[in-house]
Image (spheres, rainbow, N blue to C red):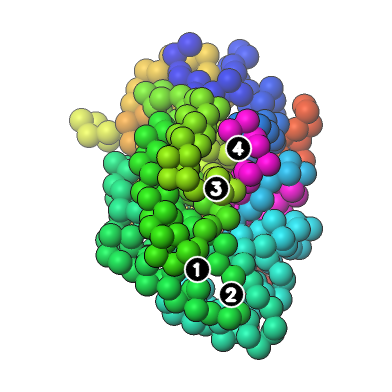
Amino acid sequence: MDYPLLSDNLTVNGNALYFDGRNVCELAAKYGTPLYLMDEDRIRARCREYRAAMRAAFGEKSAVLYAAKASAYKQMFRIMHEEGMHADVVSSGELYTALQAGFPAERLWFHSSNKTDEDLRLALQSNVGRIVADSMEELAALQRIAAKTGKVPEILLRLTPGIDPHTFEAVATGQVDSKFGFGIETGAAEEAVRFALSLSSVRLVGFHCHVGSQVFDSDVFLRSAKIMLAFMAEVRDTFGYVADVLDLGGGYGVRYLPSDPELHLSANIAEIGAFLLAECDRLAYPLPLIALEPGRSLVADAGLTVYTVGVVKPIPGVRTYVSVDGGMTDNIRHALYGAPYTVLPASRMDEPPAMRATVVGRCCESGDVIQPDVPLPGTLQRGDLLAVCTTGAYHYSMASNYNRLPRPPIVMLRNGDDYLAVRRETLDDLLQCDL
Ligand code: LLP
C-alpha cells in the first residue's frame, strides 16, 4: 500500500477507499461533497472502552464526560446518551442542543471560562448536573442568580495545576499563564475555595482541571492528579472540606499522521487508577468520584472528510496546488494551528504517489491550506475525490460560513448502513438570520 491507513476502519478495494467498510466514492456520489463521514460504530466502541476502563479503575466512583465542543449536534448527544455517557457543555448553545436531543440534564456539566448571566440562568433552569466555576465573578453571579431561584447548584472549581503538557501552546490550557481557572501556585485556588464555601446558594462538590491536548501517555495526568490531590489535602487541613469529585479533564491524543503513536487507553487509565488509589491512601483522603472529559479521542478518528478535486495547478519549479470544494470553512485546523493531516486519493488508491501537492480550499485567502506537501497520484484531476483523515473532532464544531459557503452534511455509518445526522446547509439557510 502506497498510502498510510491510520486506523483499521480505513481499507482499500481496487481504486476506492473504504471507511467503516463502506465505499467512500459511492457515499460521495450519494450525498455530494464536501462531506463529513462519521463511523458511529467506532464512536460507540470508544465510549465503551472508556467506560469499561474507568469502571475497572474506580468502580462506581467514575464518570466519563463527552467534551461536546469536539462535535456537537443532536444525533451525537443521542449516541452519547445511549452509551451511558455524561457530557460537558460550554455554552447555552451546546446545552440547548443536548437538551433538545433528550440528553438528561443531570448528566450535563457546564463549563466555560466566561459564562454569561444568561448561561447561568439557563443552566439553573435546566437543572444541569454540575457547574464548573472558573472565576470569582462567576461565583458571585451564581450566588446572586441561584439565590433568586432558590436552587443550590452543585459546583466544581476549575483549577490550573501549572503544567505545560508539551503540546502546541494555543491548546495548552493548564499553565499558570492561562485565562482558564484558578491558579494553585498563585493562591487563587485557595481564595476561591474560601469564597465558595462561604456562599449559601452553591454547594462545592469538588475540583476540576484540564491540562492540554494530544496527550499520549499517562504522565501528564499523573502529574496533574498529584498536584490536585496535594491541594485537596491542604484544603482539607485548612478548611476541613473533603471533595466528592475530582475531574481530570480531557486531552488524550489521536493519530493525524502515521508517525503519531497509538494510544493505549485502557492501560493508561489503569495506571492513573493505581496512582490515584495509592495517593489517596497515602494522604488518607477518601477516593472521590473520578471523572475524565475526553473529546478528541472519542470521535476524531471516527471522522473522514471527503472532497472533490477542482483545479490542479502545477507551477513549474515551485509546487502544485490541488484545490478542493471545501477548505478552511470545514477544516480550519491547519490554517489556525499548522495542524498535520493525512490526505488520501479516495478514488485513485491503486495509483502510486507520483507527485507532491499542496491541498488547498476554495476560500479567497492564501492561508486556506488543508495540508502542504501531500503525496498524490500524478493523474489526479478535476472530479477525483480526496479524503482527509481524523476529522471527527473540532471540524464540524469549528466550521464557518466564510465566503458564504454552506456547511457540509454529516453522514453517520452504522452496521453497514448510512444516514444523515446533519443535513447539508442550503443557500436559503445562509439567509436565515438576514433581515
Ligand atoms: N475539558 C475541557 C475543560 C477542555 O477545555 C477540553 C478541550 C476538553 C475537556 C476536551 O479535550 P480533548 O479530549 O478533546 O483534547 N480546537 C482545538 C482543541 C481545543 C480543546 C480545548 N479544550 C483543536 O482543534 O485542536
Of residues 382 and 200, the one nearer the viewer is: 200
| Three-letter code, disc 3 | Pro
The residue lying toward the viewer, choosing from 282 and 295, is: 282
- Disc 1 versus disc 2: distance between alpha carbons? 10 Å
Task: Give the CA distance from mark 4 to mark 1.
Answer: 25 Å
Rendered residue at 49%/48% (across/down): 285
Q: CA distance from mark 4 to mark 3?
A: 12 Å
Mark 4 or 1, nearer chain start: 4
Q: Which badge, 2 or 4, is on the more N-terminal residue?
A: 4
**Amino acid type at image mark 1:** Ala
**Identity of the residue drawn at 38% across and 44% down:** 226
Q: Is residue 33 left or right of residue 225?
A: right
Q: Position of residue 99 (x, y in %)?
A: 74, 63
Rendering coords of residue 188 (x, y %): 34, 69
- Residue with the mark numbered 2: 202
**Residue found at x 53% / y 79%:** 199
The range drawn in magenta is 55-81
**Residue that protrudes farthest toward the left in the picture:** 317
| Quadrant of the image containing the C terminus | bottom right
The dot on residue 133 is 1
Which residue in the structure is indicated by mark 4?
58
Contact flag, marks 1 and 2 (Cβ < 8 Å): yes
Name the N-terminal-most of marks 2 and 3. Answer: 2
Amino acid type shown at disc 4: Phe
What residue is disc 3 on? 286
Q: Is residue 269 left or right of residue 179?
A: right
